[in-house]
């Protein structure tokens, strides 16, 4: 864990706060405890909120005035005066779904169980705090999970492969998935991608849309898959001149020969992405993916 991280723990239990501060510091994380939650309502300067992460109990007891304090009463204050801090709420078993959703609506990034067997488990939030609420990190975690599913022996791998392709293309800024399982006169489009990339190679394809077929078969795609994709691309008219077969089982030499024939005769580019290409795309940073994808397709 990073020693630069500063955590604020807010709870009305002195014992709980002290124990959690001790646990964080034992893990080399700077921690500050607050067992009088109502005092936070008087904090209104940025330097009073010099925290990266705020752990806030859902039920905060009563203030000296007798008012019951709840996380959703403190969250507007925290979101106003500590907008750069990430807030995670602790919950007990008897907290309602409505309370959890209200906290999230007010800016809490997650709600985690407070009643764990070992208080040190709550220190895990410090390890992942930078990823909490980050759309790019969440998408990457989803992509890695889908890739694990695709490469396992579980059922529904072809559907998972489609989901993986959707998330991979949506992770590249110049592409946007605009449809999946789209019906056409020639058949179904597994994934339809809008291509807004201005690199000269993409522009030479003359293809505003990329038509993608996903196959998770034991054998490489046969000619019928190639012919089907070509027919589907043609249904898109001037919008699409490019199709991509994503195949976990690779491609035959015959497939490569047919790629050249189609380009010469029909002006359509049918391209292929194999297992090794997907593996590389999954592991690359999102801002490196398009360049790698282009390098693979350019060589075909």
Image (spheres, helix red, strand yellow):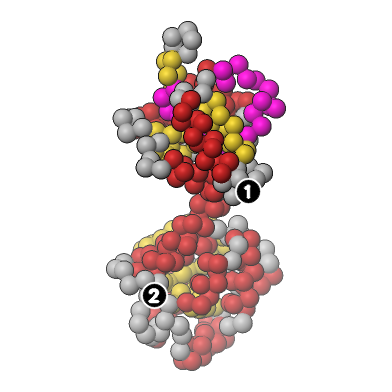
Q: Quadrant of the C terminus?
A: bottom right
Q: Position of residue 64 (x, y in %)?
A: 48, 10
- The magenta-colored residue range is 39-60
Q: Position of residue 116 (x, y in %)?
A: 38, 41
Foreground pick, 27 / 206: 27
Q: Position of residue 129 (x, y in %)?
A: 55, 45
Magenta-colored stretch includes residue 53? yes
- What residue is shown at x 59% (from left), y 36% (from top)? 31
In the rendered view, tell whether residue 12 sits above or below residue 197.
above
Name, please, the residue furthest toward the left. Answer: 155
- What residue is shown at x 54% (from left), y 49% (from top)? 127
Left or right placement of residue 174 versus residue 66 in this view: right
Q: Earlier in the sequence, mark 2 or mark 1?
A: 1
Look at the numbered disc 1 and give the secondary structure of its residue.
loop
Look at the numbered disc 2 and give the secondary structure of its residue.
strand
Tell me the quarter of the picture where residue 84 sits. Answer: top right
- What residue is shown at x 68% (from left), y 22% (from top)? 45
Foreground pick, 2 / 197: 2
- What residue is shown at x 66% (from left), y 25% (from top)? 48
How far, Cα to Cα, is label 2 from label 1? 43 Å
Magenta-colored stretch includes residue 44? yes
| Residue 2: assigned label | 1
- Residue at which label 2 appears: 215
- Residue 214 visible: yes
Left or right placement of residue 269 versus residue 288 in this view: left
How many marks on residues? 2
Instruction: Indicate which label's residue lies in the foreground, 2 or 1.
Output: 1
Name, please, the residue furthest toward the top. Answer: 65
């Amino acid at each position: 864990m990073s020693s630069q991280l500063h955590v604020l723990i807010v709870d009305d239990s002195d014992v709980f706060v002290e124990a959690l501060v001790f646990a964080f510091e034992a893990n080399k994380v700077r921690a500050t405890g607050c067992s009088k939650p109502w005092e936070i309502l008087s904090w209104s300067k940025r330097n009073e909120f010099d925290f990266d992460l705020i752990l806030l109990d859902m039920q905060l007891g009563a203030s000296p005035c007798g008012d019951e304090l709840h996380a959703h009463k403190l969250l507007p204050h925290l979101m106003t005066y500590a907008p750069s801090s990430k807030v995670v709420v602790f919950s007990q078993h008897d907290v309602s779904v409505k309370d959890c959703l209200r906290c999230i609506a007010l800016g809490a990034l997650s709600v985690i169980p407070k009643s764990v067997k070992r208080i040190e488990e709550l220190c895990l939030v410090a390890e992942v705090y930078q990823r909490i609420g980050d759309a790019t990190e969440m998408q990457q975690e989803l992509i890695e999970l889908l890739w694990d599913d695709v490469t396992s022996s579980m059922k529904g791998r072809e559907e998972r492969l489609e989901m993986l392709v959707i998330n991979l293309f949506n992770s590249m800024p110049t592409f946007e998935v605009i449809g999946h399982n789209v019906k056409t006169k020639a058949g179904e489009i597994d994934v339809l991608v809008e291509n807004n990339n201005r690199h000269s190679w993409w522009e030479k394809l003359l293809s505003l849309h990329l038509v993608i077929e996903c196959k998770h078969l034991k054998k490489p795609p046969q000619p019928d898959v190639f012919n089907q994709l070509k027919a589907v691309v043609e249904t898109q008219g001037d919008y699409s001149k490019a199709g991509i077969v994503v195949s976990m089982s690779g491609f035959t030499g015959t497939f490569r020969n047919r790629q050249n024939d189609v380009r010469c005769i029909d002006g359509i580019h049918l391209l292929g992405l194999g297992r090794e290409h997907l593996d590389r795309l999954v592991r690359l940073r999102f801002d490196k993916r398009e360049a790698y994808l282009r390098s693979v397709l350019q060589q075909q």
